Image: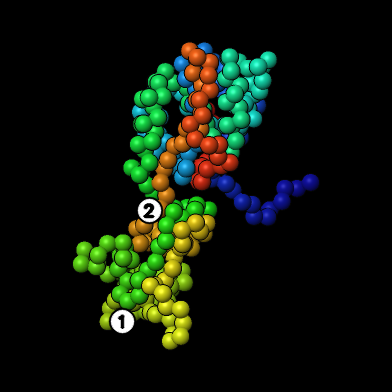
């Protein structure tokens, strides 16, 4: 049968599918680390960013971080006293829910926990669709400024007139007045409020909202690592740190280190 001459989609990117060998290698690497390190931490990441995670990996270069399927990681640790790879390490298995990782290290909790807690607030980025807004963001009526009221007007500048068409496309009722972009108040009798509400605290952001936040330079996503529990080889005890989480915002599943 002759080959079809129809147009075909040619993908310019190639992604190597994770094979059984990759999974078994992750399983073996986790088991190799258990007797080599004094502590095993289960952690989750809010608002995953590869750039920030790379910095953490560099800071913890004497440790090993693993991301992978939770069932595979749980199997490597064990599910019961009978198949636990080390005494009581199977007690970490209930914490392997959602998108979490394992950190093997010889650094003690007294050193590691303050470092991870200190990451919060220092590493922020623009929110992505699907993230939860931690606060309200409202664009005040009148002249639209570059940060939409995030800083006082005397320290801000009016937003560029070239952005006016995109702001209208994104739903803002703006128009040009004497060369400036102005946000119009609703007609008389309408619910004016303080301005145009882009998002409220607790909203699950969509792509339109995240685009508006980025246009105004508002970073709402905070890269944060939460340690759920850790196991110590010397005592064979598992210590809870924070309550279990069902999942983390904006986290991408990765392979082992």
Front disc: 2 or 1: 2
Residue depicted at 24% across the width and 68% down the height: 153
Q: Name the residue under label 2.
A: 219
- Residue 71, position as x, y percentages in the image: 64, 30
Q: Which residue is drawn at 42% across and 49% down?
A: 221
Q: Decide which of tag 2 and tag 1 comes sooner along the chain.
A: 1
Q: How far apart are the two marked residues, 2 and 1, measured between alpha carbons?
A: 29 Å
Residue 5, compared with residue 185, is above or below; it is: above
Q: Residues within 10 Å of mark 1 (few under 14, many from 20)?
A: few
Left or right: residue 19 versus residue 184 is right
SS state under label 2: loop
The residue at which mark 1 appears reads as 177
Check the image and name the residue furthest to the left: 154
Expressed as whole percent of the image width and height from the top left, the position of residue 60 reads 38, 26
Residue 135 image-quadrant placement = bottom left
Q: Among all residues in the image, which is located at the extreme bottom?
A: 188
Q: Do the residues labelled 2 and 1 touch (CB within 8 Å)?
A: no
Q: In which quarter of the image is residue 139?
A: bottom left
Residue 250 at what x, y percent from top left?
50, 46
Q: Determine crowd level at label 2: few under 14, some 14-19, many 20+ residues with C-alpha closer than 10 A.
A: some
* Percent coordinates x, y for residue 11 in the rendering: 57, 46
Q: Which residue is drawn at 43% across and 87% down?
A: 188
User: Would you place residue 172 above or below residue 6 in this image?
Assistant: below
Q: Is residue 253 visible?
A: no
Q: 192 or 9, which lies in front?
A: 192
Vertical relation: 105 (above or below) 178: above
Q: Can residue 139 be seen in this view?
A: yes
Q: What element carries label 1?
A: strand
Rendered residue at 59%/23% (across/down): 91
Relative depth, front residue between 189 and 46: 189
Residue 233: numbered disc: none
């Amino acid at each position: 049968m002759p080959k079809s001459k129809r147009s075909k989609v040619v993908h310019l990117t190639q992604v190597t599918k994770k094979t059984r060998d990759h999974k078994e290698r992750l399983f073996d690497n986790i088991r190799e680390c258990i007797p080599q390190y004094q502590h095993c931490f289960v952690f989750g990441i809010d608002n995953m960013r590869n750039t920030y995670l790379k910095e953490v990996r560099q800071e913890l270069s004497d440790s090993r971080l693993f991301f992978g399927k939770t069932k595979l990681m749980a199997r490597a640790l064990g599910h019961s006293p009978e198949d636990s790879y080390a005494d009581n390490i199977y007690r970490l298995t209930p914490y392997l829910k959602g998108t979490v990782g394992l950190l093997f290290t010889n650094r003690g909790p007294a050193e590691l926990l303050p470092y991870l807690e200190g990451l919060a607030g220092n590493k922020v980025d623009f929110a992505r669709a699907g993230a939860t807004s931690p606060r309200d963001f409202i664009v005040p009526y009148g002249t639209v400024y570059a940060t939409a009221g995030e800083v006082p007007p005397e320290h801000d500048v009016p937003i560029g007139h070239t952005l006016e068409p995109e702001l209208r496309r994104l739903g803002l009722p703006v128009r040009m007045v004497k060369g400036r972009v102005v946000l119009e108040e609703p007609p008389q009798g309408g619910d004016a409020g303080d301005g145009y509400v882009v998002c409220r605290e607790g909203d699950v952001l969509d792509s339109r909202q995240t685009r508006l936040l980025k246009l105004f330079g508002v970073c709402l996503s905070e890269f944060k690592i939460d340690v759920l529990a850790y196991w110590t080889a010397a005592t064979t005890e598992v210590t809870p740190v924070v309550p279990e989480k069902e999942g983390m915002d904006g986290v991408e599943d990765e392979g082992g280190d």
